[in-house]
Image (cartoon, rainbow, N blue to C red):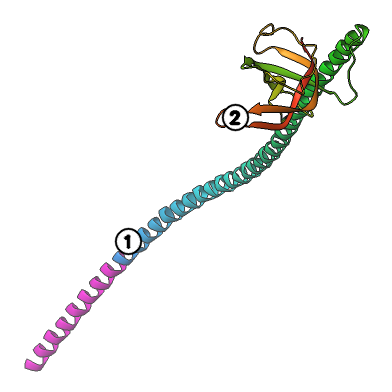
Amino acid sequence: MKLVFLFLTFAISINSIAQSKKEQIEMLNMRIDSLNKAYVKDTIVLGKAIRKINGEQNVLSAKLDKANAQLNQKSETLKDKSNTIKSLNAKNMELMREIKELRSEQKTLFAKQKALRFSLDSINKMNELETKGVMIPVNAIPFHAILQSESQYDGTWSYEMNFDKGQLSGVSTLYLKSGFEDAFEMACDCPEFESIPEGSRVFGFAIQSTCSFEDVSNGAVITKECYRPLILKKY
């Protein structure tokens, strides 16, 4: 009897354990199914998110490509404009140089025109003088000048002149007389003293001569080369 009881007890225990294991397995299977469903759901959601992100990435990539293309185009445009500016600057510098040269040439032409006008005036004045019987030596130097001042002191009569370009350009004074006793004095067709205002433009003829000056410190006479006017007229 005891053996039968023990056997039944053991059988019931085994059955109970088996039943418990089965229930645990079923619960685990249910959990696995639940996890599988959750995994499938999460996979679907994640797939949608990935597809959305890929779509946004494609849109952003397209925008980036478009922006890069526009940037390259603008860079080329900027490069072309920069080259154009450099070319215009170079042309501007060349034009400025040409304008400077033209102004210089214009200045030179004005000077030549002025000189030609004075030369023509001189010829006309010289013709007038010749018609009056005034003789002009061959070695006479024609000049145009501006009268700075006229001085008559202690027997000396001189003209301070600002000569135009010419043979007398380095000379500043013409001596009509170099003292009371001037052995080299020459007759001059010149106006009376102070009859020509200072700053007036004059023309005339001068000749190289010798002037004697007394040194007031010792009374010695100094002789030096000078120029004397033969004709002096106001324009």
> Crowding at label 1, few (<14), some or many (≥20) Cα neighbours within 10 Å?
few
Q: Which mark is residue 25?
A: none
Q: Position of residue 227 (x, y in %)?
A: 75, 26
Instruction: Confirm whether residue 136 shows in the render.
Output: yes
**Residue shown at 89% from the left, 21% from the top:** 137
Q: Position of residue 87 (x, y in %)?
A: 71, 39
Residue 4 lies, with reference to residue 133, above or below; the image says: below
Taking the spot 87% from the left edge, 26% from the top edge, the residue there is 139
Q: Looking at the figure, which quarter contains the C terminus?
A: top right
Of the residues under marks 1 and 2, which one precedes in the sequence?
Answer: 1
**CA neighbours of label 2 inside 10 A, class few (<14), some (14 to 19), many (20+):** few
Q: Measured along the vertical axis of the image, is residue 2 above or below residue 180?
A: below
Quarter of the rendering containing residue 130: top right
Residue 3, magenta (yes or no):
yes
Q: Is residue 217 left or right of residue 47?
A: right
Q: Quadrant of residue 180?
A: top right
Which residues are the magenta region? 1-30
**Residue 1 in view here:** no
Q: Nearer the viewer, residue 119 or 105?
A: 119
Query: Taking 13 as reference, is 2 left or right?
Result: left
| Most common SS among magenta residues | helix
Q: Which residue does the numbered mark 2 point to in the structure image? A: 219
Q: Which residue is mark 1?
A: 34
How far apart marks 1 and 2 lie (CA) works out to 144 Å
Q: Residue at x 68, y 8 (%)?
A: 193
| SS type, badge 2 | loop
Amino acid type at mark 1: Ser
Camera-nearest residue between 55 and 143: 143
Residue 131 colored magenta? no
